[in-house]
Image (cartoon, rainbow, N blue to C red):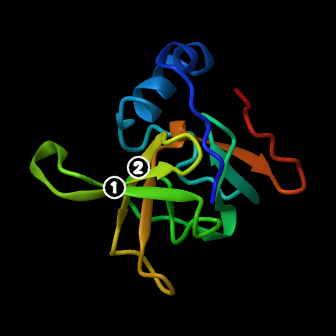
Amino acid sequence: MVDKLILSEDEWRRRLSAEEFAVLRQHGTERAWTGCFVGTKSAGTYVCAGCGHPLFRSGEKFESGTGWPSFTRPITADALSERVDRSYGMVRTEVLCARCDGHLGHVFPDGPAPTGMRFCINSVSMRHVPEGEPISLVTA
């Protein structure tokens, strides 16, 4: 189980850029092909931009052709939480950071083997920590 980071809306606004706040706290989406991690292949760990919680390993990243970074699985089974998203007249599975409940993107059952899953994630929701560097969690 992951220890939750709970902050007020004002605290999140102070800590995050306007774009990070819109995506992570207001469930927004960056435009396709605009994110800084589309097409990157650097080794390391992708962490939540809101709280530093580890989300994905770079080895699980693949090119899905969707315009957003995509991953086959999270770094651990409890790294993410999911909820039903009925916005925009469709039903999807939203993925959130298990630590701060920040909106990351969505997961779809159309990914490559071995999982068959495609975690389609907003670049602005993440930061990349190069392999060998320490991961720092944000504290209250």
**Split into 4 quadrants, where in the image is the C terminus?**
top right
Instruction: Decide if residue 24 is on the left or right side of residue 17.
Output: left
Residue type for callout 1? Arg
Residue 83 - label: 1
SS assignment at label 1: strand
Q: Quadrant of the N terminus?
A: bottom right
Residue 64: numbered disc: none
Total count of labels? 2
Q: Nearer the viewer, mark 2 or mark 1?
A: 1
CB atoms of marks 2 and 1 within 8 Å: no
- State how far apart marks 2 and 1 are (Cα): 11 Å
Residue at image x 52%, y 20%?
Answer: 8
- Residue drawn at x 81%, y 46% is 135
Q: Kindly identify the residue that appears in the image at 48 percent across and 85 percent down.
A: 113
User: Label 1 neighbourhood size at 10 Å, few (<14), some (14-19), many (20+)?
Assistant: few
Q: Position of residue 10 (x, y in %)?
A: 51, 12
Q: Is residue 98 above or below residue 126?
A: below
Residue 125, position as x, y percentages in the image: 53, 39
Density class for disc 2 (Cα within 10 Å; few <14, some 14-19, many ≥20) is: many
- The percent coordinates of residue 6 (x first, y second) are 57, 32
Residue type of the residue flagged with mark 2: Gly
Residue drawn 47% across the image and 57% down it = 81
Q: x%, y% of residue 115?
A: 48, 82
* Residue identifier under label 2: 105
Secondary structure at badge 2 equals strand
